[in-house]
Amino acid sequence: MYECDEFTLRWYTGNKSITLKGNKASEIKANFFSILESEAEVIGQSKDESKIASDFHNDSIKTSGPSSNHPTCDPTPSNLEQYLLISDLMSKFMQRIDDKVEGISNEVNNIRTNTIRSEQTDTINNLKREIDELKNENLELRQRNATITYVMADLQTKVKDIENEKNSLITAIKLIQLDQSNSNEGKS
């Protein structure tokens, strides 16, 4: 079965018939018969057989039901030879259609697979690019962290030096005060 917006084609292998439904069903039916007639020429039929197939098409092909475009044949004894010829041609034609539909189906599946692979490849490439960016950002952050660690260590050393200097100044001030208080006591 093949479906699209404009028509639906269904091949019944059991009774070897085709149904066409939709907006373009009658146009496609006409194209099928045109192809069928040209197929008869390709197979090597004489002009008389092509005329028989054409007469059969004009006289014996009917549409069953008001809403269906399913061709049916009227195999009366006078048309039996024509019916067998058309039936054989239809079988060959339907086999070609089946092969082409299967080929198209395989191509569609390949395109889908390639599209999925392409999308997967794009996603993988994007993820790799993001990983590389994150690695670079992580490296920059590690370098900043190392720099900040060195600066902090340097500042802590300076703070200790300043505290030591402050303690030395306090001790010097105490000694000066003690010395002054001793000299004031000696003068008194």
Image: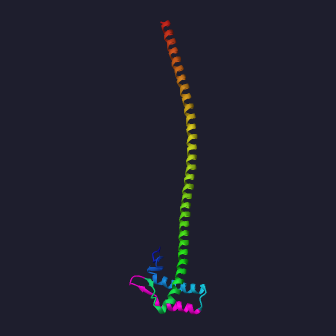
Instruction: Give the total number of marks visible in the rendering.
Output: 0
Give the residue displayed 41% in from the left and 82% down from the top.
68
Q: Nearer the viewer, residue 121 or 76?
A: 76
Quadrant position of residue 153 = top right
Q: Position of residue 62 (x, y in %)?
A: 44, 87
Name the residue furthest left. Answer: 66
Give the residue displayed 52% in from the left and 20% down from the top.
167
- Residue 175 versus residue 126 in the image, above or below: above
Q: Position of residue 99 (x, y in %)?
A: 55, 74
Residue 58, magenta (yes or no): yes
Residue 55, magenta (yes or no): yes
Q: Nearer the viewer, residue 81 or 156?
A: 81
- Residue 98 versus residue 118 in the image, above or below: below
Q: Which residues are magenta?
A: 47-68
Give the residue displayed 43% in from the left and 86% down from the top.
63
Q: Nearer the viewer, residue 8 or 139?
A: 8
Q: Position of residue 1 (x, y in %)?
A: 47, 74
Give the residue displayed 55% in from the left and 69% down from the top.
106
Name the residue furthest front. Answer: 77
Quadrant position of residue 138 = top right
Q: Position of residue 141 (x, y in %)?
A: 55, 42
Q: How is the image coloured?
A: rainbow
Quadrant position of residue 160 = top right
Q: Nearer the viewer, residue 13 or 2?
A: 13
Instruction: State the predominant SS element of the stretch in magenta.
Output: helix
- Residue 89 versus residue 1 in the image, above or below: below
